[in-house]
Image (spheres, helix red, strand yellow):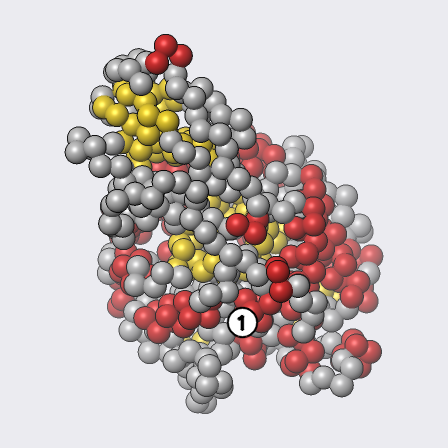
């Protein structure tokens, strides 16, 4: 069960429950050259004469977090057979695809462990119930392939610094890095963390991430909000020795932020040196700083990620070391300490003209909660997306978490799907990640598509195809918005609901889009 972390008010110790991130997940370093700045452009295609309809965005990220830690989402419990694990995962993907989602963020490294075959870290206990025990198969190729079959990007979600959920490291496998290198670790409360101030820790984290990028066909690498531990009952985080050795005259807070910034920059560089198309982004706690702390902060009164966990999202944006930020705005409209209506415009302004994409982390797990009246209303989540439309910088939303995607509390996701996801959407373009529009599809053999099943010849370099229905008026709006987009498919055929004229385009893995080919269902080309 997902629990709320206390939101500490600036004045005194007033506590507001159900705050930003989940206990287990989303719930001055190197800077790149100026040319590294991320940019976004529209696909190269003819300009349509249609006025864009904001109700049907052509490009929008729609994703869901799939948490593996503590078996929150997948697998539902430890010790399941591979067949049962596969069936549960496919059920989540089918639910996402049904609602026209286009991305999943799957936790592959909850705590210095692996949901995949690794020579660097032990098998995760959340597969078998025993840390280090081989489950008998490597889940990651299956997880990726099944996502791709459904047109879903696969983002591998890592927690960089969490080493163990048990402070007794003797319970970990002998090969675990925390046992092999106890000098890397800091005990804090009932958990063990890697010390972010140590260069060898950063080196290990980068090695783990690049190992996955090198060996698996992931579309992205994702961090959540966990960097230095959240303030709690752990006392002081004991990194004094590292600070003495590496602090170089900085304040402790500035040094800690610098450690995180350095890791972020190094991960960004390492990923893109290997595979430029792989996206890298972070889902930070929803409040960077409060205006009471900093004039450039948000009009909020909660915990500051910058000051409390040393996560400086504005530094990542300004230096271009992330492709996107996905702030966890887990509060409803009107919430006094952290109003959704105040935070969305703040983050929109933070990324403005930076080229860094902005996606909003949405608290689907809070829908139906009785401790806040706003969350007892089925329409609160949909209202968030209505507000997002006012800010062009908002490129999509990701929901925590997959469990609620299946249970659909208050039928809230039915409403979101009806009001916002009635059409599919292409992925927002990141031109720095490369790619190019594939050749357009070729007309079907015999210049005819039989009945109401459209078919076309595959295009070289195409990862998927977009299918648009041309209305009876003949007005071609396919470059403006998604009003006529009926499907994004991975195979060169699609069963349409009615005869008529359709446009089909080719998409590469980043959704650079080709010119269209015209196909008539039940007729010629």
Residue in front for this viewpoint, 352 or 92: 352
Q: Position of residue 222 (x, y in %)?
A: 57, 54
Q: Going 56% across and 52% down the picture, which residue do you hit?
A: 432
Quadrant assignment, res 300: bottom left
Residue in front for this viewpoint, 288 or 179: 288
Q: Is residue 201 visible?
A: yes
Q: Position of residue 135 (x, y in %)?
A: 66, 36
In the picture, measured across the screen, residue 101 lies left or right of residue 24, that is left
Q: Going 77% across and 59% down the picture, which residue do you hit?
A: 203
Estimate how packed mark 1 is, as few (under 14), some (14 to 19) or many (20 or more) residues with alpha carbons within 10 Å. Answer: some
Q: Position of residue 414 (x, y in %)?
A: 27, 46
In the picture, measured across the screen, residue 384 lies left or right of residue 250, that is left
Q: Going 42% across and 48% down the picture, which residue do you hit?
A: 42
Quadrant assignment, res 197: bottom right
The quadrant in which the C terminus is found is top left
Disc 1, SS: helix
Residue at the far bottom in the pictured view: 12
Question: Quick check: 209 above or below 329?
Answer: above
The quadrant in which the N terminus is found is bottom left
Q: Position of residue 2 (x, y in %)?
A: 45, 59
| Residue placed under numbered mark 1 in the picture | 314
Question: Quick check: 257 above or below 457?
Answer: below
Q: Going 33% across and 25% down the picture, which residue do you hit?
A: 518
């Amino acid at each position: 069960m997902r629990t709320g972390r206390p939101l500490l008010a600036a004045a005194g110790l007033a506590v507001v429950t159900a705050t930003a991130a989940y206990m287990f997940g989303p719930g001055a370093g190197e800077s790149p050259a100026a040319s590294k700045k991320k940019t976004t452009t529209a696909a190269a295609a003819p300009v349509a004469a249609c006025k864009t309809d904001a109700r049907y965005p052509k490009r929008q990220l729609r994703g869901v977090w799939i948490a593996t830690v503590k078996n929150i989402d997948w697998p539902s419990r430890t010790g399941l057979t591979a067949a049962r694990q596969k069936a549960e995962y496919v059920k989540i993907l089918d639910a996402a695809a049904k609602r026209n989602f286009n991305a999943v963020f799957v936790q592959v490294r909850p705590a210095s462990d692996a949901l995949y075959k690794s020579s660097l870290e032990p098998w995760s206990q959340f597969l078998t119930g025993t840390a280090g025990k081989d489950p008998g198969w490597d889940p990651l190729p299956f997880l990726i392939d099944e996502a791709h079959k459904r047109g879903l990007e696969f983002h591998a979600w890592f927690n960089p610094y969490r080493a163990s959920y048990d402070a007794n490291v003797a319970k970990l496998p002998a090969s675990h890095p925390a046992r092999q290198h106890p000098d890397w670790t800091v005990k804090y409360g009932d958990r063990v963390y890697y010390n972010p101030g140590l260069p060898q820790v950063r080196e290990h984290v980068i090695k783990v991430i690049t190992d996955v990028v090198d060996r698996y066909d992931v579309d992205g690498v994702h961090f959540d909000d966990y960097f230095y531990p959240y303030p709690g009952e752990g006392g002081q985080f004991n990194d004094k020795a590292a600070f003495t050795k590496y602090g170089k005259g900085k304040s402790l807070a500035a040094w800690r932020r610098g450690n995180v910034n350095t890791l972020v920059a190094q991960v960004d560089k390492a990923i893109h040196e290997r595979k430029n198309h792989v996206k890298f982004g972070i889902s930070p706690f929803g409040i960077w700083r409060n205006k009471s702390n900093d004039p450039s902060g948000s009009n909020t009164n909660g915990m500051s990620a910058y000051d409390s966990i040393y996560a400086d999202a504005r530094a990542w944006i300004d230096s271009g070391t992330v492709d996107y930020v996905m702030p966890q705005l887990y509060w409803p409209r009107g919430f006094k300490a952290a109003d959704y209506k105040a935070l969305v415009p703040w983050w929109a302004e933070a990324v403005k003209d930076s080229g860094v994409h902005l996606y909003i982390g949405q608290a689907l797990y809070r829908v139906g909660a009785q401790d806040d009246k706003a969350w007892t209303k089925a329409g609160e989540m949909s209202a968030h997306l209505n507000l997002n439309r006012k800010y062009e910088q908002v490129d999509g939303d990701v929901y925590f978490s997959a469990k609620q995607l299946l249970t659909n509390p208050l039928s809230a996701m039915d409403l979101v799907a009806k009001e916002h996801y009635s059409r599919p959407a292409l992925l927002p373009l990141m031109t720095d990640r490369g790619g190019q529009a594939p050749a357009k599809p070729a007309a079907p053999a015999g210049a005819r598509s039989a009945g109401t099943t459209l078919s076309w010849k595959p295009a070289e370099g195409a990862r998927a195809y977009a299918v648009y229905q041309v209305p009876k008026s003949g007005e071609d709006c396919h470059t403006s918005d998604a009003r006529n987009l009926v499907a994004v498919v991975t195979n060169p055929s699609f069963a349409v609901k009615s005869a008529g004229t359709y446009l089909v385009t080719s998409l590469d893995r980043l959704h650079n889009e080709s010119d269209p080919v015209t196909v008539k269902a039940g007729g010629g080309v």
